Amino acid sequence: MARRISGRSHGDPRGADTRARVKDDYRPSRDEILRYIAENPDRSGKREIAKAFALRGEDRIWLKDLLRDLRDEGLLTKERKRLTRAGALPHVAVLDIVGRDADGVLLANPSEFTGPGSPPVIAIRISRGATGPVPGIGDRVLAKTFPTEDPTGPAYTGRVMKIFEKRSEAVLGIFRVLKDGSFRIEPVERRQPELIVDKEFQNGAKNGDLVEVEPARASRYGLPRAKVLAVLGSLTSEKAVSMIAIHAHDIPHVFPADVIAEAEAAKATLAGREDWRDLPLVTIDPADAKDHDDAVFATPDTDEKNPGGVIVTVAIADVAAYVRYGTPLDREALKRGNSVYFPDRVVPMLPERISNDLCSLREGEDRPAIAVRMTFSAEGRKLRHSFHRIMMKSAAKLAYPQAQAAIDGAPDKKTRPILDNVLKPLWDAYAVLKRGRDARQPLELELPERKILLKPDGTVDRVIVPERLDAHKLIEEFMIQANVAAAETLEGKKESLVYRIHDAPSLAKQESLREFLATLSLSLARGAQMRPSQFNGILERVRGADNEALVNEVVLRSQSQAEYSPKNIGHFGLNLKRYAHFTSPIRRYADLIVHRGLIAALGLGPGGLTQPEADRLEEVAALISATERRAMAAERDTVDRLIAAYLAERINDTFDARISGVTKAGLFVQLPQYGADGFIPVSSLDGDYYIYDETARSLFGERTGKGYQLADRVEVRLLEVAPMAGAMRFEMLTDPKPLPGSRRSFHKAKGRARASQSRFGPRGRRR
């Protein structure tokens, strides 16, 4: 048993002056280890724990075994390279204030919680000398969290860092005037009911308006009622569908007057820059791109000590020259976090004067930029790099297909003059970098991207899957290497930065994936250090097989979500030890922070990272991670609505589909041609009692053992569409099939289903 030791100081569980007095055979108890991890979330790596308890030699091996046991028992989880108590909150979290305790202390819950059990309660601390707005019930806040030791009170205390804009209980909908003159609110969310609006609560709304309404308490009979609070815009315009997502997700889309004024008056400091205008840098972008924030050039390395090596140059628009920390322009950029790309519009992070003019690397025009020059060996290993603040002039604006066509033997008037001295050296350099990428073995998932092409009226014309060209891969790999160089430079200079991090799959997701692969007679080795190559090996084994799409889908879902953090854990998917976003400061605030850091660290002039900004990086990283997730959700919702509206006239048509999700309630199916999802309720599946098998990602019949599994290809009939909600309901036409592994897991799944009462009778009805 461990001894009780007093005199604890912050960060040292035994006190700063106790280490010399502790016996050599001292080993902390499990409770002491767990308490230390809870109290020191920022210093909870294995090495830090060993240092805190002065463990050496065999004691460190004992500690490693103990920590593994605690993880196996579910008492600890590993996040990034640190250990946390299972279900513990991150040190910085978004919280919803939900009430007060008997003493009037505000209580909050995490806005997102994926841990076991119920969400923890956080007591919100208000500093006595605090100035500015004070949070209240109903507010959403960004807060630092601190675990408590009181078993009878809240599990955490929280110190508010930021109060998000308060939202009322209002919902969005489409105002509709029916033939009898009555008013309805058409829902724009899948689970939102239709609402009635009485004439006295119309508030000037017209048919087809997007409105914000306040629902009244539902009556016992009939539809619930609502009153119109505000008219947000008409949905008769060609950009109506994206406007729904903009308002539903609270995306700032109108620049304040002071921000526009600052952008219009912006001027860059051009003194002290290196003149690179004679270097034939070129931009290669999508054909419809309006802003061009990166340019590239490559040449063979003439150094005889580096035979077969190449020198790659990447130049990025110098946004930091125009957007200075703390200005209205900067505050608005941080509020937005990133640009949002809809099929029918872009909501930019910066006004067009900056993004499409001053910081767009236009062909033939002088532009300030920050460039990185990188030297690679013939094997694709980066030997060195250097950053420069330059003045450049783009030699050509090219589209991906245009550049690729020139390399493939079909140059046009623009690419023919630069084919030999610019384009061919770029492709030669990419061949070198590809060797390095292949040796690095990042995660290689086959995930085709679809693009919606619109008609002039904003409706869908068609959906295409653009060909993935070597031109795309070239730019992608050049940008990755530039991002790595930025992270290495800032880390080497001990400058604060925001990393782009991607954690390895959690132990729970690994085990879930392992169980699933076992149903397909595939194995995933257990080990403390998972590597992308292990997943690539599995994907290679199923390449060309019937279950290739299924395995790709499940491997994708096992991965963690990438995010921003001032603390580095590496990037699992890219298999990189350090990574930061540097190459898109026009559309990502994270990149702007990195630019400022490079300017400060290398003494490149004005516009560098300031100490107040560096002190806020933890908060800023949390904010821009949240705005990125917001943008992704808004973009996905808009695509769903556009496709649903496009297919609304094809009720009762049949489609080829693929099962994209399996739940107790039914099957989600995706139409590969359109990339849209719909739902098949389990109540519509005929002829058996269907049981949900979570391990096999399937619904199978209790009587026959036949059923449907994630990624199965099926035929479906479209029955119902709610265009503005982006919802579609289908009928299954394909008969259930024997499922691999279903007989092995039949009784186990059946027992789970009975225990959770997730059994369904004929046509899926519960019994």
Image: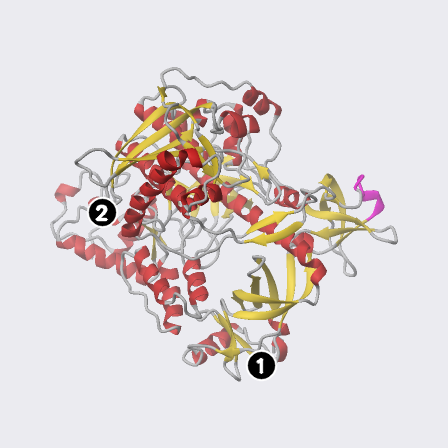
* Residue 592 horizontal/vertical position (percent): 43, 31
* Residue 81 horizontal/vertical position (percent): 30, 49
Between 687 and 613, the one lying in front of the other is 687
Residue at the spot of label 2: 47
Find numbered disc 1 in the image and state the secondary structure of the residue it sits on: loop
The N terminus is located in which quarter? bottom left
- Residue 412 seen by the camera: yes
- Residue 91 seen by the camera: no
* Residue 466 horizontal/vertical position (percent): 51, 51
Mark sitting earlier along the chain (2/1): 2
* Number of other residues with Cα within 10 Å of mark 2, as a class: few under 14, some 14 to 19, many 20 or more: some
Residue at the spot of label 1: 688
Q: Quadrant of residue 343?
A: top right
Q: Is residue 271 above or below residue 338?
A: above
Q: Residue furthest bottom?
A: 703
Between 597 and 441, the one lying in front of the other is 441
Q: Is residue 704 left or right of residue 548?
A: right
Q: CA distance from mark 2 to mark 1?
A: 55 Å
Magenta residues, start to end: 198-205
